[in-house]
């Protein structure tokens, strides 16, 4: 099979000789590995590779898209995409201007393909056995995944970008049950291909098994409004799920109500509140050099000093809304078109220590981690992974996990303290538009929220 560089140059010539407002193509070759245990049984073990590409054509405002996994059908794929674009087009094409780039970016520092499958299995075996040894559990889940991908992006404007990325993710969950009550605890981690980042977790794995059992005997919080402190994990998830998705410009300009709410310069919180999406942060799963439209990744302030100042864009949404592209058009693989997605989204740290946050809270709740949630427009519901009462400025007894719900904009206004201890969470992945899981990171320092609605007894 020809190397994708050879195919890319063949495709470049085809694009040059095709009449359209704009054409882009993406070629990919990559491999992945998956392992998972349910209880003590090895449920999934797979190693796979994939090579293919896509062509996207813009003609009179209409897009045409064709993907392929045979490189002898480039001309046919281009003709299909062009025909679809001509059928869809009935207006002026609009794309924000971007300087063409010709570059081969640096290779990842780590490659999970160099780690033997047997070593990956041994790691999962050890974590699984630790959980069963430490606690009387109902079931466990242990899952591992990695991927390595090289892609070439080229377009009719002259860009030719080659870049590679590596990714690893690990999820370990312990579930305990008694008298109809089921509780779970888990960890979710990831890295940009460094297998060492997910080793040496014996103590954390032991703790989640013990915590799942302990929560069976923990009391439930009384439902109502509390002053709540969120740890960096659930605060980061809140930032990503409840606010980050609302900042994706394709969602905004397609929704009249969101256009009214997400008005630039609108105040969403105190002057200490800054929310950022930054695809340039080194060493994080949501980091990349160029997005899947050939736009450089950037640091984008969404909220600065409490005011909405930016949003995330593709070239098309930027042109439609009269703003600058932010480098956030991403696709999980060549079978999909790029859509507006987050990268590394976080609340910027403030100046308050965790101890200072606790001080003065007579009765509140401290929530750590998370294991589920839903959002609908500006409303959210999240399930915390762990919860503790706060009494007279001290973290007190363990509770059964609580459910937090409310309006994201009211909640942002109710943040009255932002910690100085930013942590980025690299577990899991993001889903949108049928494309999941996309590697991202989210984070936050501890944050304190007044009048937060907590579900309980």
Image (tube, rainbow, N blue to C red):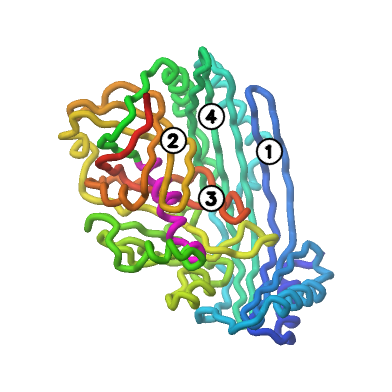
Tag 3 residue: 430
Circle number at residue 383: 2
3 or 2: tag closer to the N-terminus = 2
4 or 1: tag closer to the N-terminus = 1
Depth check, mark 1 against mark 3: the one in front is 3
Residue at left offset 48%, top offset 57%: 343
Residue at left offset 29%, top offset 38%: 229
Please state the horizontal and vertical placement of residue 263, each as a whole percent of the image.
Answer: 35, 67
> Which quadrant holds the C terminus?
top left
What's drawn in magenta, residue-wise?
232-251
Depth check, mark 1 against mark 2: the one in front is 2
Residue 305 placement, left or right of 187: left
CA–CA distance in space, label 4 to label 3: 19 Å
Residue at left offset 44%, top offset 35%: 383
> Looking at this view, is 412 or 12 the one in front?
412
Residue 233: in magenta span = yes
CB of mark 1 within 8 Å of CB of mark 2? no
- Answer whether residue 289 is visible to the viewer in this image: no
Circle number at residue 173: 4
> Looking at this view, is 110 or 456 the one in front?
456
CB of mark 2 within 8 Å of CB of mark 4? no
Q: Most prominent secondary structure in the magenta stretch?
A: helix
1 or 3: tag closer to the N-terminus = 1
Tag 1 residue: 117
1 or 2: tag closer to the N-terminus = 1
């Amino acid at each position: 099979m020809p190397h994708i560089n050879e195919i890319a140059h063949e495709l470049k010539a085809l694009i040059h000789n095709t009449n359209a407002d704009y054409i882009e193509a993406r070629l990919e070759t990559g491999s992945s590995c998956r392992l998972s245990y349910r209880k003590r049984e090895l449920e999934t073990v797979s190693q796979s590779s994939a090579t293919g590409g896509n062509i996207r054509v813009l003609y009179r405002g209409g897009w045409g898209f064709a993907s392929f996994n045979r490189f002898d059908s480039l001309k046919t794929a281009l003709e299909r995409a062009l025909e679809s674009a001509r059928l869809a087009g009935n207006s002026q094409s609009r794309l924000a201007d971007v300087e063409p780039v010709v570059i081969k970016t640096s290779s990842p520092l780590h490659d999970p393909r160099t780690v033997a499958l047997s070593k990956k299995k041994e790691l999962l075996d050890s974590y699984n056995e630790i959980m069963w040894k430490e606690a009387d559990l109902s079931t466990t889940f242990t899952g591992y995944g990695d991927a390595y991908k090289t892609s070439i992006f080229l377009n009719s404007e002259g860009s030719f970008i080659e870049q590679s990325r590596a990714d690893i993710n690990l999820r370990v969950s312990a579930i305990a049950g008694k008298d109809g009550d089921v509780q779970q605890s888990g960890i979710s981690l990831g890295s940009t291909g460094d297998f060492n980042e997910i080793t040496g977790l014996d103590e954390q794995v032991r703790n989640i098994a013990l915590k799942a059992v302990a929560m069976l005997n923990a009391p439930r919080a009384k439902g109502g409004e509390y002053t709540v402190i969120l740890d960096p994990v659930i605060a980061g998830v809140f930032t990503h799920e409840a606010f980050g998705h609302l900042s994706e410009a394709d969602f905004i300009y397609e929704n009249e109500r969101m256009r009214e709410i997400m008005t630039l310069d609108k105040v969403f919180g105190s002057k200490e509140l800054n929310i950022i999406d930054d695809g340039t942060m080194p060493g994080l799963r949501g980091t990349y050099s160029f997005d899947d439209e050939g736009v450089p990744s950037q640091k984008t302030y969404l909220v600065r000093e409490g005011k909405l100042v930016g949003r995330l864009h593709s070239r098309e949404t930027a042109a439609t809304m009269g703003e600058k592209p932010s480098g956030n058009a991403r696709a999980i693989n060549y079978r999909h078109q790029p859509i507006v997605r987050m990268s590394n989204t976080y609340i910027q740290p403030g100046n308050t220590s965790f101890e200072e946050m606790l001080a003065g809270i007579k009765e509140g709740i401290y929530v750590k981690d998370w294991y589920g949630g839903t959002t609908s427009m500006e409303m959210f519901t999240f399930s915390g992974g762990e919860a503790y009462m706060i009494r007279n400025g001290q973290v007190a007894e363990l509770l059964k996990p609580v459910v937090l719900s409310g309006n994201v904009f009211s909640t942002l206004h109710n943040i009255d303290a932002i910690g100085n201890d930013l942590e980025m969470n690299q577990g899991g992945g993001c889903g949108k538009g049928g494309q999941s899981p996309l590697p991202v990171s989210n984070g936050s320092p501890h944050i304190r929220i007044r009048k937060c609605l907590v579900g309980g007894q």
